[in-house]
Amino acid sequence: MNQKHQEVSEYYGETLEKSEDLQTNACCTITPPPKHIRDILAQIHDEVISKYYGCGLTIPNQVEGLRILDLGSGSGRDCYIASKLVGQEGSVVGVDMTDEQLNVAQKHIDYHTEKFGYTYSNVKFIKGNIDNLDQLDLEEGSFDLVISNCVINLATQKQKIFKDVYKLLKPGGEMYFSDVYSDRRISADLQNDKELWGECLSGALYWNDFLNIAKNAGFTDPRVTESHPITVENEDLEDKLGDIKFFSVTYRLFKLEGLESDCEDYGQSARYKGTIKGKSTSFDLDDHHHFPKGKMITVCGNTYKMLNETRFKDHFEFFGTWDVHYGIFEGCGGAMPYKESENGGEAGSCC
């Protein structure tokens, strides 16, 4: 490990013993989970729950039977949620570099196998640094979904992570993850503050740098599914940070050929069938694409591909071709993580 990795491992393996030990609310999930996730959480071992340090909901819809990779899996909370959702025929691999966290995750494998009524475990945890995914025994093009929960900000090779993830995904696969972002680039002095880095703040990417990193890795059209401002609520750390604003954002990135840098209009539409589990009345692709069951919705070419060339295809009817281009599509929003005027003002802290 380099010095930064060692400091992170010590912070999450020794300094923090439980979620309540965090000094800010950056690594804190603000939005209450939906009922089907709450029902699974009730089956997760208490020790796994107590050492959760995430900032969002990182498992999307329609994951039954998928092969999932969790980057920075920690005590295994999200891996075990995913384990239940993918079913016995799916599989989950968690990667983490902190021994104390891995030990908690691994010692409860049998507990969750029995709790979920499985004949064998569909979860595996391996020790590894997400900066070096290419050095782990992970087959390229073998994962349907890659998730991560408030961990990439702790890494030092962020561009490399996204390039490695792109290689690991199958065509049509997805990276769905929550993390912390800032409204400006963070100074080197703040990045060298061990506490600020460990609290998921000073390693946060400036949101526009993230968009460029994602696109450079091959994820042409990042989509926001959820975003909230973060209120640090620690006066000493707030003084250090000054006027920097932080946001907890969940993005989805698809590995799709032919996505365009802008949303283009080809006169296409999609109609949701209402068949995704837990989404019988409507489905949200992102924070500006809402599909009520049975209603035909006009979409840009990129959105058409995100529905038609992924695991969502069988749940939609599609209309239109690529024969005629009508110019820029006006119905898509931007990829900024948060706009106060659109989200009703400042959000409070989580509990």
Image: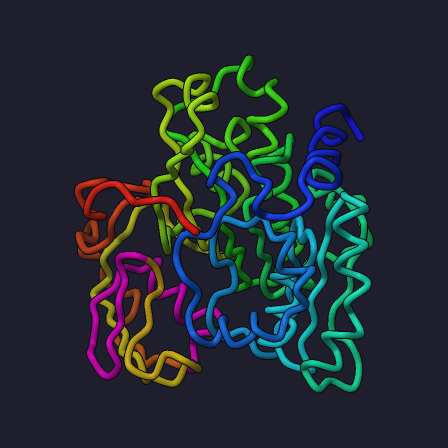
The extreme top residue here reads: 189
Q: Nearer the viewer, residue 321 or 218?
A: 218
Judge whether 293 appears above or below 25 on screen: below
Judge whether 12 appears above or below 139 on screen: above
Where are the magenta residues, as a range?
287-314
Residue drawn at (28%, 74%) of the image: 270
Total labels drawn? 0
Residue drawn at (59%, 19%) of the image: 193
Q: Nearer the viewer, residue 81 or 302?
A: 81
118 left or right of 203? right
80 left or right of 347? right
Judge whether 342 appears above or below 131 on screen: below
Residue 35 image offset from top left, x and y in percent: 43, 75
The part of the image, by quadrant, that contains residue 301 is bottom left
Residue 313 seen: yes
Residue 34 image offset from top left, x and y in percent: 42, 70
Residue 231 image offset from top left, x and y in percent: 37, 36
